[in-house]
Amino acid sequence: MSEEPRRKGLFRRKPKDPNKKPGRLAQMRQVYELSAKHNKATPWLLAAAILGCTLLGLLAGLLFGGAVFTTILGFMVGLLLGMFMLGRFAETAAFAQMDGQPGAFGAVLNTARRGYLMDEKPIAIDPKSRDLVFRSTGRAGVVLLSEGPKGRSAKLLAKEKKRHERILPTVPVHTFQGGNEDGQLKMKQVVPAVQKLPRKLNKNEVLAVRNRLAALGTQGTRPPIPKGIDPNKARPNHKAMRGR
């Protein structure tokens, strides 16, 4: 057997693993493409941030000395500013993509960190209107977030609050309405509103509340899950509990 086929075999590309997560550069490229798709000015704004900071650094160096150092420093500051802006643009684009989809506010609530643990499956679903109520548990207590028209979802949210207060009489139960009507939280307002809540529980108490809520279950027969919510992915986010 000749050596040529063996050499080719050594350099044969391995098949890509579909379950392998993309690298940091691939993730950044995906974020950029998502942002540029919804905001055509993204590349120009990023370039302006980097170039503007670099020029400011150069100008400071020409005035006070050390132009090389200040120019490099300005460039690095521009990169950091560009990455921050890109994150904001991507967040806005993601919210625009999810807007109007069932379970969108639950997905946003699940991004809350700093010790919050969320039930990805809605804890209450109106079988007729398909209004939803999501729950997250953290240092502030229990957070209930409804999704649906203001007047209609308010009844379902109030019902769930009473039910939780009966089983957790000493634990704060906070309620929010998600939507685009007056008095409701828009997607970008959900996480800041939750993180502003005062902390009342420690980590052990949060876990105790979670165990107590496991016994609460749902009232009556669980209605069907609407499209857009995968019941196979209904598990608590343990990374969020550890603040990662």
Image (cartoon, rainbow, N blue to C red):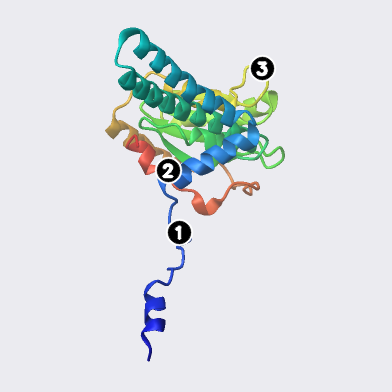
Q: Is residue 98 above or below residue 67?
A: below
The answer to the question of whether label 1 and label 3 lie on touching residues, with beta carbons closer than 8 A, is no
Residue 240 screen position, x and y as percent = 38, 37
Q: CA distance from mark 1 to mark 3?
A: 42 Å
Q: Earlier along the polypeptide chain: callout 2 or callout 1?
A: 1
Q: Quadrant of the N terminus?
A: bottom left
Point out the residue furthest to the right here.
Answer: 128
According to the image, label 2 marks what residue? 215
Whether label 2 touches label 1, CB < 8 Å:
no
Q: Pick the quarter of the image with the C terminus.
A: top left
Q: Secondary structure at mark 1?
A: loop
Q: CA distance from mark 2 to mark 3?
A: 35 Å
Residue identifier under label 1: 19
Residue picked out by circle 3 = 182
Q: Amino acid at mark 2?
A: Ala
Label 1 CA crowd tier, 10 Å (few <14, some 14–19, many 20+) = few
* Percent coordinates x, y for residue 151 in the rendering: 69, 23
